[in-house]
Amino acid sequence: MEIHQIPSLRSPVMVIAFSGWNDAGEAATGAASHLLASWTDSSTDVVPELIADVDPEDFYDFQVNRPTVYVDDSHIRSLTWPGTQVFGLRTPEIDHDFVIVRGVEPSMKWKTFAADILDLADDLEVDMVITLGSMLADTPHTRPITVSGSGAHPEIARRLGVEISKYEGPTGILGVIQDACVRRGIDAISLWAAIPHYASNSPSPKATLALVNALEDFLEVSLPQGELHNESAAWEEEVTEMAKEDSDVAEYVKALEESKDSSDLPEATGESIARELERFLRRQSES
């Protein structure tokens, strides 16, 4: 890892997202990219600072994640390697600064990779690690995207007010980082968005928005929304039109809607309304 600087950050929260196995519909990396882009404004002093680059030579199989060639307007060719970058984000309007880790899921040496990331987290005095993921699920695109929050250890889950992770089976780099956090005594939770498997081919701004909102709710802060609401509505309309073109898909979506509506309890609907109200009041008070 090449460390460019160790900035002074206030109670930083590390948010981690990787493309690949953990990133259905590019929702998780979309959320990380949204956080970085939202404050990139010349009218403010909030600009992402590059803290470190992870050397791709040690962690990536380039036959799996190949480098990409770009040609600019002057016909100059450049090569971009798959990798991971760490950014610092000073956000004086809220209580926490952020450390954003965004990259491609590594191909090898996961233990070493996780240790390097968490060594840097220690250097930056990170208070908490939040990993973002998205998965394919039997869920309709016309209903709110469900985001589940969980802790890798019962004590952490209880103290932070999230569910205990009961998942068993193959895992990705996020699971390895969560386990490493537990072993180091670092508070860590995971937020996962469920994306309709029949609408996974294109980026899903609706799922990205759901992850951003879940991050807001957990940290009890207000985050910039940008164009996510408009992009989410456009995505839903596009998927609806696609479903109409295939009668089997349309019937399947209808069945998913009926199942979703019947399983959602009134209490859950009330909780959803309460969360929306809390977000609205936070934005009103901060503005």
Image (spheres, helix red, strand yellow):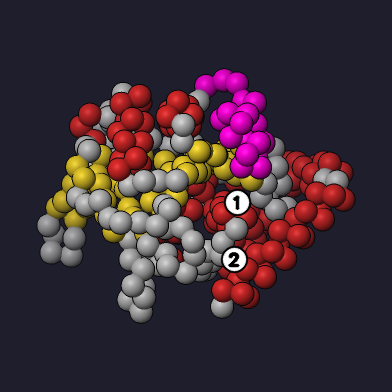
Residue identified by numbered label 2: 229
Image height check: is 73 above or below 142? below
Residue identified by numbered label 1: 218
Write the residue at 16% across / 51% down.
78
Image height check: is 259 above or below 8? above
Label 2: which secondary element: helix
Write the residue at 12% across / 57% down.
76
Q: Position of residue 29 (x, y in %)?
A: 44, 48
Q: In the rendered structure, which segment of residues is drawn in magenta?
A: 152-170
Residue farthest along the top direction in this orientation:
169
How far, Cα to Cα, is label 1 from label 2?
Answer: 20 Å
Q: Position of residue 5 (x, y in %)?
A: 22, 52
Query: For residue 126: magenta?
Result: no
Mark 1 / mark 2, whichever is N-terminal: 1
Classify the position of the C terminus by image quarter: bottom right
Q: Position of residue 282 (x, y in %)?
A: 62, 68
Query: For residue 165: magenta?
Result: yes
Write the residue at 58% across / 34% down.
156
Between residue 62 and residue 36, name the one nearer to us.
36
Between residue 118 and residue 83, name the one nearer to us.
118
Residue type at mark 2: give it: His
Residue type at mark 1: give it: Phe
